[in-house]
Amino acid sequence: MGANVSSRGGGRGGRRRTRRNRLNADINVTPLVDVMLVLLIVFMVAAPLLSVGVPVELPKTDAKSLPSETEPITITVDKDGTVFLQETEVTLDDIVVRLSAIAQNGYDERIYLRGDNASDYGSVMKVMARINAAGYSNLGLVTDPVSQ
């Protein structure tokens, strides 16, 4: 009436795990693989969008690239002669004022000048002369490498 008999312990007092009741130590990697594939696709789609937003066809040269630890300021002259500071369209008269506002290192700021292959040489040189006359001397011209 008041006795409870257990058949599991076998009278040993401790719990013993049988083959059927053993812990499952396997790791399901399927969700991890799914997440990694989604991240791979996201980065493959997003990587081309991380470049400078003004599309220009750069001239092709064999020049070596300059090492840079920080993101430089980019000025772009498109084929119509329109000037862009980063991705914002600016006039030739306003370029020095806006450049001074965003330059963190003052006159030592690295500035990359991107000129479209079809743009007028004089337009690119006018922008370059304005920047140089304002006191910025760390100026580089951006080109595409020659494909072999």
Image (cartoon, grey):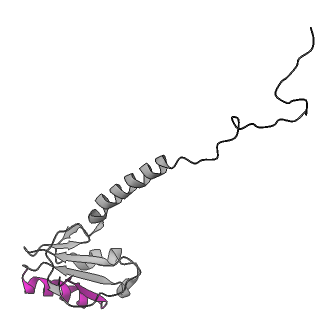
Is residue 1 at least partly visible in the picture?
A: yes
Magenta stretch containing residue 80, yes or no? Answer: no
Magenta stretch: give its range.
119-147
Residue 128 at x, y percent in the picture: 19, 87
Task: Please state the horizontal and vertical placement of residue 34, each as a whole percent of the image.
Answer: 42, 49
Q: Residue at x 10, y 82 (%)?
A: 123
Quadrant in the rendering for residue 74: bottom left
State how many labels appear. Answer: 0
| Residue 71 vs residue 130, the one in the foreground | 71
Residue 65 is left or right of residue 60, and the answer is: right
Say left or right for 9 vs 145. Answer: right
Residue pictured at 27% horizontal, 69% vertical: 51
Query: What residue sits 23% from the left and 66% below the top?
Result: 53
Does residue 134 show up?
no
In which quadrant of the rendered image does the C terminus lie?
bottom left
Q: Is residue 94 above or below residue 37?
A: below
| Vertical relation: 19 (above or below) 59 | above
Residue at image coords 64%, 47%:
25
